[in-house]
Image (tube, grey):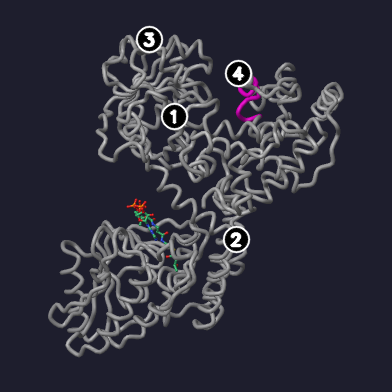
Amino acid sequence: MPEVVSYALDGDIAVITVDNPPVNALSLPVRRGLAACFERFAGDASAKAAVLICSGRTFIAGADITEFDKPIEEPWLPKVVHYIEDLAKPVVAAIHGTALGGGLETAMGCHYRVAVAAAQVGLPEVSLGLLPGATGTQRLPRLAGVEAALNAMISGRPMPAKVAHEKGVLDAIIDGDLKAGAVAFARDLVKAGKGPRKVREIALDAASLPAGFFSDYRKSIARETRGFFAPEQIIKCVEAAVSLPYDQAVKRENELFMQCMTSPQSRAQRHLFFAEREVSKVPDVPKDTALRPIHQVAVVGGGTMGGGIAMNFANVGIPVILKEINQEALDRGMAIIRGNYEGPVKKGRMSQEAMDKCMALITPTLDYKDLGNADLVIEAVFETMAVKEIVFKELDAVCKQGAILASNTSTLNVDEIAAFTRRPEDVIGLHFFAPANVMTLLEIVRGAKTSNEVIATSMALAKTIRKIGVLVRVCFGFVGNRMFFPYVREAQRMMLEGVPPERVDRVAFEWGMAMGPHGVSDLSGLDVFDKLNKEWKDKPNDPAYCRMIHALVEKGRLGQKSGAGIYKYEGRTPVPDPEVTALAKAEAERLGVQQVEVSDEEIIERLLFAMINEGALILDEGIAMRASDIDVVFCHGYGMPRHRGGPMKYADEVGLAKVVAAMEKYRARYGDLYWTPAPLLARLAKEGKTFNG
Ligand code: 3HC
């Protein structure tokens, strides 16, 4: 087996190379190899200094995340880092690609750091529910300053080499060949008689910080880190860095790291890390499937959705034609797009020039004939089959051969839509989530006849427009909406049972959802839900099903957009409305729905377990390829917090037997219709297994 860490001499400079593809993660063999090579360097009298460099596409990109579920094996990384730092001869880290997490920590254990200009360095552990646990929380503040280090660790965002150089994390930027440059840098050190320089000896003390620094810092990040465990632990480590002797602070870092690593949150976030990479793999579509070039896109329907979709392509430099039915609608659509761009320009997040470039890439039209040259057309019109039929028949007539014809339908049968054309193999669902220019999810719905080329091109396209594409199959609502409906259904049912909507929303929010189910229903538009329910052929045979949505729509309460829905609105602030409570009571009496006292725990169980059970059916039916794909859908498209890892991972954490037991409790109360455990769920629970096993 080739060595993952090798030792060579370049004159009087030792070159220690890590070669552990794909990203040189610090697996046990790498840690052992580093320890052995640096020991050899220590004893090699002919080597006056050392360079630590990596083969392949990147410097060490961090600890090996797959090892976190296994027992720790020595040498543990902090030990390696300290061994390097304590060497009597200077060590230079030579960085290319991304020095992340344990990679940057190793580099900060070295006495000097150089990098190519395109490199990035960072401590992204927070996105895995962790903190930098190999002395990173102690070293980065010493090099970059307390606030900059906190910002880097709390956001997890890497710094470009230039910024890292300015902040003192890097000593030099190397032009040209990195290895040659780093060896020359090391040789210069030797010549100048410059020895090791220990980061841990850089002074750092609380007196240098403004009064109340940490409490102000906590307040400043409270909103964006709500519900997450790791950010607070990172702050505690930095507090220790400024108030405790180094060795004690490292001990504290280690304790808090272990707390993070064994937390359900970190398990959930690590799960998502791999889920987001797994999701692009489609077992039955060969990797070498030819991709169709997409140079020109068209969007049919210039409403909020169509406009948002068009922006995705303009943002990455792909020209888009926006087709509407009349001039007024077209002008309105273009104005919405303009408004969407103006926001970030006003806030300084986008330049006027960039906005003008994007706007220039969007061409409005009223004529289907202008779509003849498009490589991809996305329909984003009214959500009824009758309208889809008109549009797809037109597209079939005007679009060139080989064009991909996509529907942005959120629920309807893509096979039926495909049958309106003479080329069902070119038809696919591309379901964007509102606001389409912001949300990162793209549900890609393959029809029974969709060709591999069209699937592969759509998956690649998702990456081009910086979205995460999840491939699913046809059913009403696909994965996301089909699972979201039972969640809304339970929220609706609880409203009839006398549970105040604001309480359900508060409990869901506290669990971590960006918004509770009632707030989301009002935001999406109750009329939208009502219309979907009407289109749904296999709606549950239950007169109480989403009854309040229908009753409110009948009263003209469509949600936020009409100023009142489940809540009434003061501006965009939802206010509980006694009129709705009275209506719910009257409807409950009419339908014979009992008033029920529910605990917060029951609210979560009913909302989540209803959703999870649907997820199990979806998996059994092959609508989603993997449980982890479902988790990606919910964390990217439905505001589920990453620290829960998605509904299926949450079920695994709760324990499937517990989920089934709770469902049986509700089944006894409500009957079989909604609460019969899906066969897959029942089987896995019985076997003591998990969805993501
Ligand atoms: N451990 C194990 N596997 C890893 C890994 C890691 N740290 N980082 C990436 N991989 C795997 C990926 O799962 C993927 O595997 P696959 O091909 O089987 O799907 C493969 O390497 C390539 O990864 P990407 O597809 O993500 O490649 P990119 O080129 O798009 O991105 C990257 C490269 C920027 C390095 C990105 O992989 C990344 O961000 N990795 C994680 C970095 C990170 O979080 N490091 C901190 C780890 S925790 C730590 O260090 C704790 C310490 O403080 C003690």
Magenta segment's dominant SS is helix
Q: Nearer the viewer, residue 256 or 19?
A: 19
- Picture coordinates of residue 377 (x, y %)? 36, 21
Tag in front: 4 or 2: 4
Q: CA distance from mark 3 to mark 4?
A: 26 Å
Q: CA distance from mark 1 to mark 3?
A: 21 Å
Viewport quadrant of the N terminus: bottom left
Looking at the rendered structure, which numbered label has been put on residue 394? 3
Q: Secondary structure at mark 4?
A: loop
Q: CA distance from mark 2 to mark 3?
A: 56 Å
Q: CA distance from mark 1 to mark 2?
A: 42 Å
Residue 639 visible somewhere in the drawing: yes
Q: Which quadrant contains ligand 1?
A: bottom left
Please state the extent of the stretch shown in magenta in the rendering.
Answer: 522-531
- Residue type at the position of mark 3: Glu
Mark 1 sits on what residue? 445
- Residue type at the position of mark 1: Val
- Residue type at the position of mark 2: Arg
Horizontal relation, residue 521 to residue 146: left or right: right
**Mark 1: few, some, or many residues within 10 Å (few <14, many ≥20)?**
many
- Residue 236's place in the image compared with 267, above or below, is below
Identify the residue at image location x=73%, y=40%: 504
Tag in front: 1 or 2: 1
Circles 1, 3 touching at the beta carbon (< 8 Å): no
Mark 2 sits on what residue? 218
Could you tell which of marks 4 and 1 lies nearer the N-terminus? 1
Identify the residue at image location x=48%, y=77%: 204
Mark 4 sits on what residue? 537
Q: Secondary structure at mark 3?
A: helix
- Picture coordinates of residue 562 (x, y %)? 66, 22
Identify the residue at image location x=64%, y=53%: 654
Tag in front: 1 or 3: 1
